[in-house]
Structures are given as C-alpha cells and as structure tokens.
C-alpha cells in the first residue's frame, strides 16, 4: 500500500477509535487544532511520564518547572522572537495555496536524496553480495550528478536563509522549476516574512491593556526562572530544568495532521553548563536522547540525526532526531547548543544579573545552555505511525480474515488489559468484575462482555491493548484464566493470583527506564 494511503488510514483510525478528534468538529473544525479523545489522552500522558521520569527521576541534577503560558512581553523582545521568529511564505496565484518557501526547497532536496537512494537500492538488488555501496555512490555518474545538484541547491539555500534574502529564495524556487503540488504551475508571488506568534491583550482597555503573546516555546519560562531554581534548589552547574507545557505557533501551512499544529505541547529540558563545556554536553544529550527514542523498540534504522547547516541566531550547534514517517524522515526532536544567548539577552533587557556564582572558581558568569526539545504531539504521531499495522490473517482454508492492530509498546498503551467473560452468564461477569476490582489500582483496565470473543479481541487490537484476560468455566473451577497476547495472538493459562505480577512486569515504566 502506498505510504500516503497508510497515513490517511491511520488518521481515520485515530478518529474512529477515540485517539484524536478535530477541534470543534461540529463547526467544521479549526485548522491545525486537535483534541485528544479517551485513549489519546492516556497515550499522551504515558509519553509525558516516560519523558519526565527519564529526566527528573534518573538525573539528580535535573529538576522540573511549570511556568505560565503568558509572560511579560519584553521576554519575547529579548529572546529575538518579536524580530526574528518568522517563516518565509509564498503563494501560488493559480491554486491560491500558501506554502513555506523553505519547505518547498527542502522537499526538492528530499527528492534528490530519494533519487540517489533508489539508484543504490536498484544496484544492490542487481549486484547482490558483491555490491560495494561506497564505491557505487562515489562513481556512478547518475548519482554523482544528482549529488552535485543537491549540494549546489543546498549551498544556495543555506546562504539565502542565513542572509534572510527573500528575493533569492524565490529565485531558487524559479530556477529549480519547483511547481505548486496542487495547480502544477510556477505562477508564484514574491516571498514574504510572517511572524508566527499569536498575540492577545491582558487587562481591560480602560486601564491601558498590554499586548502579550502566547508563548511559542516553553524554554523562555525556564530561562527567566533560572536563578530562582538555582538558588532555591541550591543547584550547582551542570544542572537542568525540565518542563512540559503548551506552546502556540501560527503555522502558515498546517498539514499532516498533528505533525504541525497551531496549539501543541512541548517537553523541553534546558541544561546549564560551564562555558567551554557546551559541545561535550551537546554530544552527550544527542546520544542520550537518541537512546530514549530507540529504547521504545521501533527499529534503530528508523531514526537518524540531521545536523543543521543553518543555525538559529542563538545556536552554535544543532541537530534534529528524525523518524521515518510514512511521508519521509522528519524531525521529532531538536537538540540545540544555545550558548549564553538567552540568559545574556534577559540580563540586558531586564537589567537583572543572570549570573551563576561558581564556588570552585570563586567567580560569577553566565552559563551556557544545551537544550533538548521534543513535541508531545509529534512524538504521539510517531508512536502511532510506528505501531499501526494491517495484518492479513487468512489461513489455509482461504476464508479471508484480517485485523488492524496498534502494536504500541506496553508501557505506553492507554489500556493495559481487557477482562472478557467468555459468556454473559453463569457468574462469569461477576468473576471478571472481581478481577478488575483487584487490578484497577495498578493498571488501566477495561471490561467488555458484548459480541463474540473474536470481535472483542479485534476491538482491543485496534486500540492497542497488549493483554486480554478471558474468563471461562474453568476459571470458576480452578481460578485460572487465559491471557492473550496482542502481538502474537498466543494464549497462555495462568492463575488469577499471578496476573498482577505478570502484567506489572510487562508494563512497568521501571523496566523501560532501566533500558536507558
Ligand atoms: P519545524 O522545523 O518542524 O517547524 P522547529 O525546528 O521550528 O520545527 P523547534 O522550535 O525546534 O521546532 O521545536 C521543538 C520541537 O517541538 C520539534 O522538534 C517538534 O517536535 C515540536 N514542534 C514544533 N513546532 C510544532 C508544531 N507546529 N506542531 C507540533 N509540534 C511542533
């Protein structure tokens, strides 16, 4: 099945099974804003807990914070967001569609990369074991030519972005004959800058309302509280502050479901270090964060680093962790070495010292910062995309059978177990309820007695419940049940008294965190 079709299916699966709904759907929705349903909220909470505990529990020098969404407007002047948090936009006059000029060019770069990878795969299939990939990449004329095109385009692109040269961005689009995916034409407007921050007013107009912004990142709440936390927590460098919270960006092009939203949630950790040690810590956090992703077991090859050629105004090194979504490798998380830019700016704009007193050196200085920043929603989409499978279960008898299953890691699954009486009579429902009453303190359990057992298994597969407990007549006699595993569909008979321990072992966050 084409990757785009898979993506469409998982979007509708999310809606059909209570994971994600379009916001205010009865009024036809609101662009790039979504609500999380009964299972979505559980999955989201589990992702957040995995992140939070990996930061705050596992590192004694990382503490949490929950700062407000509204901040004094000077914050955003100091951080550079008022002047520089812009995206270059371009319209196609025929389709009337709006695009980010940088994304159009990035898509063109991705096409070159795809072309190269296709050539390599073709050659691998042709030459088999004798295939020397490095030699082929460096000598095959078609690859060399495409690589040259890629490098030239990338060089021009990075230069234009660095200079903020909007005329050149348009020229690159024209020179590369990039067409609008909808109209297929090259009838482009000029490129314009667009600030992504939402604004509102605080206070009533009669007493002089003040224009404020909805924060476009959670990081600044951490920076302005840096000394509050350092002093009250008696923190010594290096130390980190972690925060989970909403952020808002008026994205120009809202596509790809919850990949790019206007209201979203971030999990950010700012790690304060001694100046000069920041690149060491940057490398440390790059590796640590990659390990966190890979520990979920979605396949190491589905992740890669993308080191930035063009750095943001505040960074001296930056990389993304990308995941192979159905629409290609895309950013899930950013790791940035932000230097002392933010604290220095806040010191200048507020007139308050943002310095750390180093007892070892007996001097004060502004620390450097390494940031890890991941979107909860984008991580959610990554987890769903990696877990969604359509399986053909047709056996030798030829009777067609299939299932849709979310192979969610047990530790993240919204419902950990379903308790299913084989029939709705003879005391089996009562026994089931008793089992739930015992297990509900530890796990999110679900009871289901409607329809055949096969149908009930399929319903649980579709929401990703890893374990189904079936209560049958033998349970009444010997206090054993069957436990059915979602991924293998195998069943095992176990004593009721062992259930809690068996499941706790499989779904524990402790087990997951131990992998880090
Ligand atoms: P992009 O290049 O995709 O616009 P970015 O580089 O601006 O993203 P950052 O500012 O580094 O993103 O934000 C950190 C993380 O926050 C991203 O890696 C992503 O997971 C998440 N994020 C950023 N913007 C959005 C959005 N509009 N919707 C959902 N998640 C987002």
Image (cartoon, grey):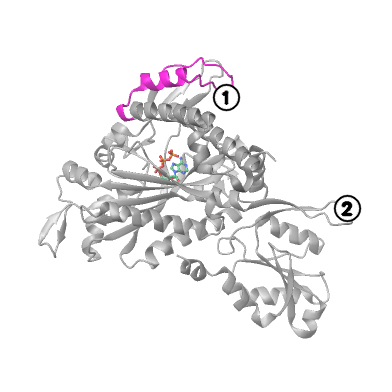
Query: Where is residue 309 drawn, in percent x and y?
Result: 36, 37
| Position of the C terminus by quadrant | bottom left
Lower position in the chain sequence, tag 1 or tag 2: 1
Q: Nearer the viewer, mark 1 or mark 2?
A: 2
Residue where numbered disc 2 is placed:
398
Q: Residue furthest left?
A: 362
Query: Where is residue 51 drawn, in percent x and y?
Result: 44, 59
Query: Where is residue 168 drawn, in percent x and y?
Result: 37, 20
Q: Is residue 180 magenta?
A: yes
Asked if residue 7 shows in the view, the reply is no
Q: Residue furthest front?
A: 130
Whether residue 425 sits left or right of residue 56 in the image: it is right
- The quadrant where residue 227 appears: bottom left
How dense is the environment of label 1, judged by Cα within 10 Å: few (below 14), some, or many (20 and up)?
Answer: few
Q: Main secondary structure of the magenta part?
A: loop
Does dot 2 land on a helix, a strand or a loop? loop
- Is the shortest distance between ligand 1 and the CB of mark 2 under 8 Å? no
Q: Which residues are magenta?
A: 162-191
């Amino acid at each position: 099945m084409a990757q785009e079709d898979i993506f469409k299916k998982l979007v509708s699966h999310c809606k059909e099974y209570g994971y994600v709904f379009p916001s205010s759907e009865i009024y036809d929705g609101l662009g790039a804003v979504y609500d999380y349903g009964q299972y979505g909220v559980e999955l989201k909470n589990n992702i957040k807990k995995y992140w939070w505990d990996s930061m705050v529990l596992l590192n004694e020098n990382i503490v949490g914070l929950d700062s407000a969404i509204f901040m004094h407007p000077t914050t955003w002047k100091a951080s550079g967001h008022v002047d520089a948090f812009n995206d270059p936009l371009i319209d196609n006059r025929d389709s009337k569609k709006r695009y980010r000029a940088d994304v159009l060019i990035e898509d063109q770069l991705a096409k070159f990369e795809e072309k190269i990878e296709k050539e390599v795969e073709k050659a691998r299939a042709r030459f088999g074991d004798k295939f020397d990939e490095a030699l082929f990449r460096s000598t095959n004329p078609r690859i060399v030519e495409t690589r040259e095109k890629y490098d030239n385009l990338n060089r021009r692109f990075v230069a234009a972005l660095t200079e903020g040269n909007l005329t050149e961005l348009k020229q690159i689009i024209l020179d590369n004959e990039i067409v609008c995916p909808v109209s297929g034409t090259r009838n482009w407007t000029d490129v314009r800058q667009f600030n992504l921050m939402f604004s509102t007013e605080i206070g009533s107009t009669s007493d002089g309302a003040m224009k404020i912004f909805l924060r476009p990142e959670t990081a600044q709440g951490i920076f302005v509280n840096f000394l509050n936390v350092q002093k009250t927590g008696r923190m010594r460098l290096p130390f980190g502050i972690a925060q989970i919270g909403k952020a808002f960006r008026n994205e120009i092009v809202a596509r790809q479901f919850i990949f790019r939203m206007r209201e979203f949630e971030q999990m950010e950790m700012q790690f304060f270090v001694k100046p000069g040690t920041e690149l060491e810590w940057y490398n440390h956090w790059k590796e640590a964060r990659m390990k966190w992703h890979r520990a979920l077991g979605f396949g190491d090859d589905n992740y890669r680093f993308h080191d930035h050629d063009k750095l943001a105004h505040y960074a001296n090194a930056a990389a993304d962790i990308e995941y192979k979504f159905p629409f290609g490798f895309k950013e899930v998380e950013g790791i940035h070495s932000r230097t002392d830019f933010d604290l220095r700016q806040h010191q200048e704009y507020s007139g308050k010292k943002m310095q750390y007193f180093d007892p070892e050196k007996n001097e004060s200085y502004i620390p450097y910062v390494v940031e890890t920043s991941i979107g909860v929603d984008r991580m959610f989409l990554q987890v769903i995309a990696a877990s969604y499978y359509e399986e053909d279960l047709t056996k030798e008898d030829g009777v067609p059978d299939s299932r849709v299953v979310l192979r969610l890691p047990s530790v993240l699954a919204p419902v950990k177990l379903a308790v299913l009486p084989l029939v709705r009579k003879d005391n089996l429902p009562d026994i089931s309820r008793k089992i739930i009453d015992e297990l509900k303190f530890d796990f999110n359990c679900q009871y289901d007695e409607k329809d055949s057992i096969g149908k009930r298994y399929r319903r649980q597969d579709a929401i990703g419940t890893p374990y189904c407990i079936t209560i049958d007549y033998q349970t009444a006699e010997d206090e054993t049940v069957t436990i059915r595993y979602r991924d293998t569909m195998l069943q095992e008979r176990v004593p009721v008294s062992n259930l809690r321990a068996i499941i706790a072992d499989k779904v524990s966050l402790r087990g997951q965190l131990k992998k880090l």
